[in-house]
Amino acid sequence: MSKVPGMVVDGAPPLSATAARQLHAAAGFLQARDAERMLGALRAVLAEVPAHPDALRLQAVALQLAGRTEEAIGALGKALALHPADALLHNALGGILVEAGRAEASLAAFRRACELQPGLASAWCNLGMVLQSRGDIAEARSSFARALEGDPRNALARTGLANACKMLGDTAGAAAEYRAVLAADPGNVQAWAGIGELKTVALDDRELATLLELHARMPAAGNESAVEERAMVGFTLARALEARARHADALAVFDQANADMRRITPWDAAAFTRSIESIADAFDTAPDPGADRSRGREVVFVTSLPRSGSTLVEQILAAHSQVEGAGELPVLANLVQAESSRRREAFPAWVRRMAPADWARLGEEYLAVTAPARRGRAVHVDKALFNWPLVGAIRAMLPGARIVNCRRDPLETCWSIYTQRFARGQQAFAYDFASIAACWTDYDRMMFRWHARHPGAIHELEHERLLAEPEASVRALLDFCGLRFEPACLRAHEAKRIVRTASAAQVREPLRAETARATAYGALLDPLRRRLGA
């Protein structure tokens, strides 16, 4: 959340010169993130004027900074009882609720701040960020626009607006907003990362020169945030170099960016392989799903590794009048984790002890939780990236669900993964050729085993064939999913829907047969080819 500006609000009680200095000192301690000294300064202010709204607000911020979240929320509650019409207090409460993981509760606080002080840009910006995180992208875009009305130079709001435009399919609008941020601040890392994620937008020579200069002066050492920022700039720079056919230079920058991400994103490939094998072994005998074999007919699960065309497949299906694209839902994984907690035993150790009624219970829970995702349509698509290890659980929980596996050329898949910066903590295998190739092998072997255990239950959709023969591929996909053919599915790029993945801009483009990138690197990618046995 953005920091709330201002030290004094209209109508605040007057302070003595000494107390005013203490209040000013508290703001300085906030910049230094020194919670204890901040609290000490504020105690002096509140001893003189116990109801001073700025001091109460900063006290809550200091408590949050000290890790005393519930005390911070309580302090703001008391402050708001004294000053219910103080927009800054409502805004501060919203920010602390977000940091406490209570984003839904923060919405009311941010909305109230916006009502009380419509020109408070930080409140509109904070509201936009929460709305964006929960998928209300159109309203988020409006909130960011309101923030910019109050503060046209607010880079956080403008970057948020650009992100919203990207998700809503307005690639040109997103590029314009990112460039507006960079015009004011050429070193804005978030804007560079954002414009790089558009992928369909080329940087001009001046932008490339600025990016090269920025990347060159970013230190190799530093805290995790600094390392991640250099990686963010590096991925955008490498893509720009690739677009100019400077493949050796691009690979060198990709290597550096991935090395940076490895420093802050640990991954144990051997442990992951053992985990995948244990899951496959646990489902060696397919569990009995019970009598209702139609349970789950409302769901299409898309399985794949990242960068394999799953967003495109969801876009095609979501163009159908009976289908809602729900995106990467965490529900399936959450239910498995909840069952592990209930049984006090890690998955998959409990799989063989599950009765048909147990699987049915989990299936019904999944359907109940995801019902809103269908938005009144007959079917929803769940494309969580790690659906593929859970195919055995899907078949037991929801035997009527369709499963579509998106498969792309291994070299192209793995290279595309290597050139993509994922959100912190996600896809931690993605930053090393050896780890990526190992994950590909795990995925390939597991899908082979799932096919053997559930013949005819999984539709293999080859990305290259989809691009070369779109109508035949789309018809086969729809037929497998029990859906009649609709021509709109061949014009999926025209669909007006929110896309929140790394392919958000690419799926707005018409299907084209040539999307290969790895081949242009030739022998430079031989180390990856050897890892894949290609």
Image (spheres, rainbow, N blue to C red):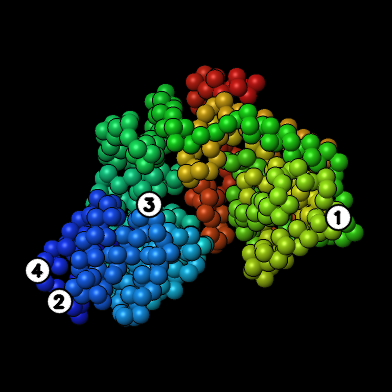
- Crowding near pointer 2: few (<14 within 10 Å), some, many (20+)? few
**281 left or right of 442 in image:** right
Mark 2 or mark 1, which has the lower sequence index? 2
Q: Residue at x 25, y 68 (%)?
A: 55
Mark 4 or mark 1, which has the lower sequence index? 4
Of badges 3 and 4, the one in the foreground is 4
Of badges 4 and 1, the one in the foreground is 4
Amino acid, disc 3: Ala
The quadrant of the picture occupied by the C terminus is top right
* Residue marked by disc 3: 175
Q: Looking at the image, is 311 positioned above or below residue 59?
A: above
* Residue marked by disc 2: 14
Amino acid, disc 4: Ala
* Residue marked by disc 1: 356
The quadrant of the picture occupied by the N terminus is bottom left
**80 left or right of 357 in image:** left
Residue 241 is at least partly visible in this image: yes
Residue 233 is at least partly visible in this image: no
Q: Looking at the image, is 409 positioned above or below residue 389?
A: above
